[in-house]
Image (cartoon, rainbow, N blue to C red):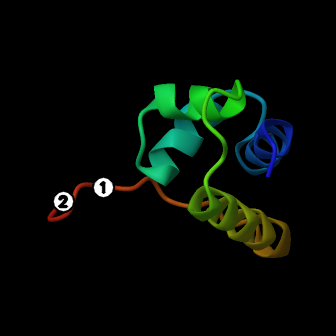
Amino acid sequence: MTADGLRAAAIEIWGERGWTSSLSAALGVERTQVWRYLNGRTPVPGPVRAAVTCWLACYRRDGTRPPPQTEEGD
């Protein structure tokens, strides 16, 4: 998945506003890490690609968005 593909998928799932925060929360990573993916500083890793691909399929199927990740025990 390219940075543009990640951006397009996230915008489709969460909309034009606030999608970077929603994506980082769903992945359980800091927004700066998402920024690195989007700006090509870090390649989009396979697990992120797989998660976003699955989330996009679920969203297209029934409108379900992934919940934010929480710390274990929360």
| Number of numbered markers | 2
Q: Amino acid at mark 2?
A: Asp
**Residue 52: quadrant of the picture:** bottom right
In the image, taking residue 42 as reference, residue 39 lies left or right, namely: right
Residue 31 image point, x, y percent: 49, 29
Q: Which mark is residue 29?
A: none
The image shows residue 46 at horizontal and vertical percentages of 63, 61
Q: Is residue 32 left or right of residue 59?
A: left
**Crowd band around label 2 with a 10 angstrom C-alpha radius: few (<14), some (14–19), many (20+):** few
> Is the C terminus in the top left, top right, bottom left or bottom right quadrant?
bottom left
Which of the pair 25/1 is nearer the observer?
1
User: Splitting the image into 4 quarters, where does residue 29 fall?
Assistant: top left
Mark 2 lies on residue: 74
**Helix, strand or loop for disc 2:** loop
- Residue 47 x/y as whole percent: 58, 63
Q: Residue at x 74, y 72 (%)?
A: 58
Secondary structure at badge 1 equals loop
The alpha-carbon separation of the residues under discs 1 and 2 comes to 6 Å
Query: Which residue sits at x=59%, y=26%?
Result: 35
Query: Residue shown at 66%/47% (left/top)?
Result: 44
Does the CB distance between marks 1 and 2 fall below 8 Å? Answer: yes
Q: Which residue is mark 1?
A: 70
Name the outermost residue toward the left. Answer: 73
**Quick check: 36 above or below 1?**
above
Against 60, is 52 above or below? above
Identify the residue at horizontal 14%, vertical 65% (top origin). 73
Type of amino acid under label 1: Thr
Indicate whether 2 appears above or below 52.
Answer: above
